[in-house]
Amino acid sequence: MTKKATTASLVQTRIIARVDVGFGNALYLRGEGAGLSWDKGALMENIAPYEWAFSTTRAKAPVAFKCLINDQVWADGENQSVAAGGTLISSPVFHW
């Protein structure tokens, strides 16, 4: 008999981006770890005006990432990272 993971045993890794991407646009993540890819972005959830969130229980190691507007315009600066089970709040900057 196999034991299923319970909700209590799953560790959440969260990325919060506080940025205005303009009406009708969306924020995506590309990266490495937790199922992310550098080739195709994962849509972030718009949880409040100017606030986007990505949450996963798949991270087993640090997650490296970068934000993109509409999965096309990369945020300025270096890649960011968050530890598995951690939360990172950032304010990415875009020149577009």
Image (cartoon, helix red, strand yellow):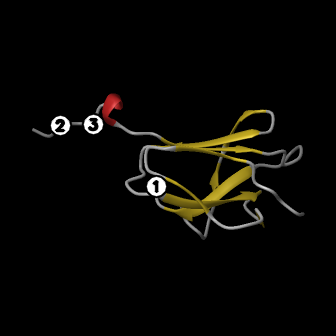
Query: Going 83% across and 49% down the picture, which residue do you hit?
Result: 25
Q: Amino acid at mark 3?
A: Ala
Q: Is residue 91 above or below residue 5?
A: below
Q: CA distance from mark 1 to mark 2?
A: 22 Å
Secondary structure type for disc 1: loop
Residue at 63% of width from left, 65% of height from top? 79
Q: Amino acid at mark 2?
A: Lys
User: How far apart are the alpha carbons under marks 3 and 2?
Assistant: 7 Å
Where residue 13 sits: x, y (%)? 48, 44
Tell me the quadrant of the picture where the C terminus can be found: bottom right
Q: Quadrant of residue 1?
A: top left
The CA span between labels 3 and 1 is 17 Å
Q: Residue at x 72, y 61 (%)?
A: 71
Tell me where residue 37 sits by quadrant.
bottom right
Category of crowding for the residue at label 3, using alpha-carbon neighbours closer than 10 angstroms: few (below 14), some (14–19), many (at least 20):
few
Identify the residue under disc 2.
Answer: 3
User: Which of disc 2 and disc 1 is earlier in sequence?
Assistant: 2
Q: In the rendering, which numbered label is found on residue 11? A: none
Q: Which structural element holds mark 2?
A: loop
| The label number, if any, that marks residue 5 in the structure image | 3
Which amino acid is tagged 1? Ala
- Give the percent coordinates (x, y) of residue 24: 86, 45
Tag 2: Cα neighbours inside 10 Å, few (<14), some, or many (≥20)? few
Tell me, yes or no, whether the two marked residues, 1 and 2, touch with CB atoms within 8 Å. no
